[in-house]
Image (cartoon, rainbow, N blue to C red):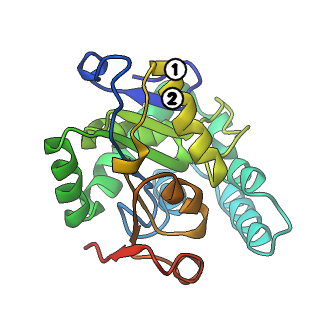
């Protein structure tokens, strides 16, 4: 189910705790946290193999990625350039492409340890939220398959354009906005968050139990005091 802003998914909403009762959360980044590597790169490769992306579109996406790496293009603009191929296809085709990508590529590489961690949090009664900069078009299938209670990710327009990226401080803003919308109060002290990069740091610092998962060097340098997990 897709939320009104295109970037939120809820499952089993009737099972959420009542208003006024503080809830404990488990917040998960996706790319390089629940899976190895970047899902956007994998998505483009998959779409190219399926004939959805032309050689020229793939080249333009590669140039945009390089410019972003050199800090000459914003992450939002780079991602928009990478997903521009979507404007040539109808909604039904794209939905089938996205669903197949998740089933064939992403779900098989979700870390075994991540699945065990999510199940443990469910047993302990926490609300599980997938908080990702990856785009809603395929992340909604991930959230549904893995049983998340909420998906807070990057909304995408029909033409593949990105208006706001769910990254860095935006992740914290999305979490707080979702709680307010649902009339929930968070017990952040008892909550957990999982991430791998410096852009996850605001979300990690939001909770009482921040966990670095297979962290990049920049994150370890900025927050050496945080617990580190090696997920496989």
Callout 1 touching callout 2 (CB < 8 Å): yes
Q: Quick check: 72 left or right of 184?
A: right
Q: Quadrant of residue 226?
A: bottom left
Q: Residue at x 47, y 61 (%)?
A: 42
Q: How many residues crowd around disc 2 within 10 Å: few (fewer than 14), some, or many (20 or more)?
A: some
Residue pushed farthest right? 72
Q: Which residue is drawn at 63% across and 55% down?
A: 168
Q: Quadrant of residue 21?
A: top left
On residue 178, the disc is: 2
Tell me: residue 171, above or below residue 232: above
Judging from the image, what secondary structure is the residue with disc 2 in?
helix
Tell me: residue 183, above or below residue 149: above
Count the marks. Answer: 2
Q: Nearer the viewer, residue 53 or 109?
A: 109
Quadrant that contains the C terminus? bottom left
Tell me: residue 86, above or below residue 213: above
Q: Which of 1 and 217 is in front in this view?
A: 217
Q: How many residues crowd around disc 1 within 10 Å: few (fewer than 14), some, or many (20 or more)?
A: few
Measuring from the top left, give residue 165's x and y in whole percent: 66, 46
On residue 181, the disc is: 1
Quadrant that contains the N terminus? top left
Measuring from the top left, give residue 31's x and y in whole percent: 46, 61
Alpha-carbon span between mark 1 and mark 2 = 5 Å
Question: Can residue 191 be seen from the camera position used here?
Answer: no
Q: Nearer the viewer, residue 207 or 58?
A: 207
Judging from the image, what secondary structure is the residue with disc 1 in?
helix
Q: Residue at x 19, y 64 (%)?
A: 112
Q: Quick check: 9 left or right of 162?
A: left
Measuring from the top left, give residue 194's x and y in whole percent: 40, 60
């Amino acid at each position: 189910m897709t939320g009104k802003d295109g970037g939120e998914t809820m499952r089993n909403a009737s099972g959420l705790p009542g208003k006024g009762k503080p809830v404990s959360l488990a917040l998960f980044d996706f790319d390089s946290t629940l899976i190895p590597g970047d899902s956007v790169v994998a998505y483009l490769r998959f779409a190219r193999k399926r004939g959805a992306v032309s050689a020229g579109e793939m080249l333009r996406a590669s140039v945009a990625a390089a410019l972003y790496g050199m800090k000459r293009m914003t992450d939002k603009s780079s991602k928009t350039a990478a997903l521009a191929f979507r404007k040539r296809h109808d909604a039904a085709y794209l939905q089938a492409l996205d669903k197949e990508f998740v089933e064939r590529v992403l779900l098989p590489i979700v870390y075994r340890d991540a699945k065990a961690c999510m199940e443990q949090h469910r047993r302990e009664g926490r609300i599980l939220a997938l908080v990702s900069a990856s785009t809603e078009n395929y992340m909604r299938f991930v959230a549904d398959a893995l049983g998340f209670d909420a998906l807070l990710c990057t909304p995408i327009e029909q033409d593949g354009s990105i208006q706001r990226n769910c990254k860095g401080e935006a992740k914290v803003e999305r979490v707080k906005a979702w709680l307010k919308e649902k009339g929930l109060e968070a017990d952040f002290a008892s909550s957990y968050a999982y991430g791998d990069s410096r852009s996850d740091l605001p979300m990690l610092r939001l909770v009482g139990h921040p966990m670095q998962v297979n962290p990049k060097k920049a994150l370890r340098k900025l927050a050496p005091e945080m617990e580190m997990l090696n997920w496989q």
